[in-house]
Amino acid sequence: MPTPAPLDPEVLFLPIGDSLTEGFREREPRMYERYLRIRSTATGIEALRHPRRRAGNAADAATLAERLSGIRSPMLIIAGSLDRARPRCERLHELVPGSEYRVIEAAPHNVYYEAAAAYNALVGEFLGRVLAAAALPV
């Protein structure tokens, strides 16, 4: 079997849509480009390794809600205020008892990347509290 030719550097497997803001693209062009390339490459590799099939027998909403309400481990849900998925994040928070929900203002879907400092601060504070409550060393 012949070795496939390398992909052209301009080939993208997945557009980013509104995952990052245009402001981020303007402020951090290198980080924006880096994200675009990493996400696209990782998505392409993963699709080759594990092709996805359409979920024909996915659990219905009631079954999922029931399963989610059974989660007892600590959960922090973080969303960017600009994220279209916020209603689903809010619903997840409603369904998981004891979960915590935080919104980072002016952040997009990929809040962990564009607003990394604020995101990491929230995660660090959450993990500190969870570990302290479990009497585990930080």
Image (cartoon, helix red, strand yellow):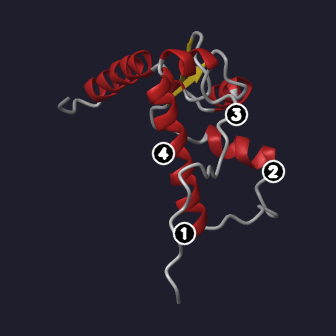
Q: Which residue is mark 4?
A: 38
Query: In the image as oriented, which residue stretches furthest toward the top?
Result: 105
Which quadrant of the figure has residue 25? top right
Secondary structure at numbered mark 2? loop
Asked if marks 3 and 4 touch (Cβ < 8 Å), the reply is: no
Residue lying at 56% horizontally and 29% vertically, measured from the top left: 110
Where is 39 relative to 75, above or below? below
| Mark 1–mark 2 distance (CA, rounded to whole Å) | 28 Å
Secondary structure at numbered mark 1? helix
| Mark 2–mark 3 distance (CA, rounded to whole Å) | 28 Å
Amino acid residing under circle 3: Gly
Q: Which residue is mark 1?
A: 49
Q: Which residue is mark 3?
A: 17
Q: Which residue is mark 2?
A: 60
Amino acid residing under circle 2: Asp
Tell which of 118 and 97 is nearer to you.
118
Judge whether residue 102 can be spotted in this image.
no
